[in-house]
Image: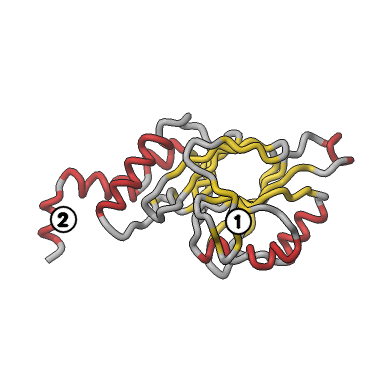
């Protein structure tokens, strides 16, 4: 697999282009490729796809927040490709619905879907080979922001049961910030530490709020 990263300045987020290149001998044929969270669609990203002769097969969305999906509007004018998401419709485009536990085969690329609600109801993490594309559920040193303690508890439960039980050497590619390993995300994530602190000492945080 070859991973290309694009930084989308409109929303300060990461877009990933993943291609299943099979070594130098595969240069004679198009490599299957997918896009993850196209926050923008610019000339640089288009050149990467076309100059590498990639066969773009699909778009994966980790969640339907505008800064992660707005590039779809331009993208769909260029490529007639399906969109995969937990949300049934994004920016007026119908999506191919996915759900927790699904295993997708898109060309030669295999993708496992993990639903991690909390930051948004449709938040998904995609496992591809040894890579976790985590959207905003796990970002650089934090977990996804939530609107309530209930949503935070749902998010943490999903992360603990579905994500942190996976092999620690997996690479995490977040929606914002630099990549890390799953072990680093679990051991040093300030968002997890803050959640555990509030859970263990709720009165302390209640008093501090006055």
Residue 15 numbered tag: 1
153 left or right, relative to 140 = left
Residue 180 placed where, x, y %?
Answer: 50, 43
Crowd rating for badge 1 (residues with CA inside 10 Å; few <14, some 14–19, many 20+): many
Q: Residue at x 62, y 53 (%)?
A: 83
Residue 47 placed where, x, y %?
Answer: 78, 60
179 left or right, relative to 141 = right
Asked if the residue at tag 2 contacts the one at tag 1, i.e. Cβ–Cβ closer than 8 Å, the answer is no
* Disc 2 element: helix
202 left or right, relative to 162 = left
| Residue where numbered disc 2 is placed | 205
Per the model, the C-alpha gap separating discs 1 and 2 is 36 Å
* Disc 1 element: strand
- Which one is in front, 188 or 40? 40
Q: Quadrant of residue 80?
A: bottom right
Q: Quadrant of the N terminus?
A: top right
Q: Residue at x 35, y 47 (%)?
A: 155
């Amino acid at each position: 697999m070859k991973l290309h990263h694009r930084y989308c300045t409109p929303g300060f987020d990461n877009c990933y282009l993943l291609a299943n290149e099979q070594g130098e001998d595969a240069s004679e044929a198009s490599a299957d490729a997918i896009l993850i969270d196209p926050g923008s669609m610019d000339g640089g990203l288009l050149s990467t796809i076309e100059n590498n002769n990639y066969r773009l097969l699909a778009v994966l969305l980790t969640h339907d927040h505008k800064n992660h999906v707005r590039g779809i509007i331009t993208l769909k004018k260029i490529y007639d490709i399906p969109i995969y998401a937990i949300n049934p419709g994004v920016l007026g485009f119908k999506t191919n619905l996915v759900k927790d536990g699904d295993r997708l085969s898109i060309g030669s690329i295999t993708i496992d879907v993990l639903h991690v609600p909390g930051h948004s109801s449709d938040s998904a993490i995609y496992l591809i080979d040894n890579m976790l594309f985590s959207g905003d559920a796990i970002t650089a040193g934090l977990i996804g922001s939530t609107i309530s303690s209930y949503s935070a508890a749902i998010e943490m439960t999903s992360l603990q049961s579905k994500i942190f039980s996976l092999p620690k050497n997996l690479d995490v590619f977040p929606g914002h910030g630099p990549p890390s390993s799953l072990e680093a995300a679990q051991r040093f994530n300030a968002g997890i530490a803050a959640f555990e602190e509030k859970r263990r000492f709720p009165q302390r945080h209640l008093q501090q709020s006055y």
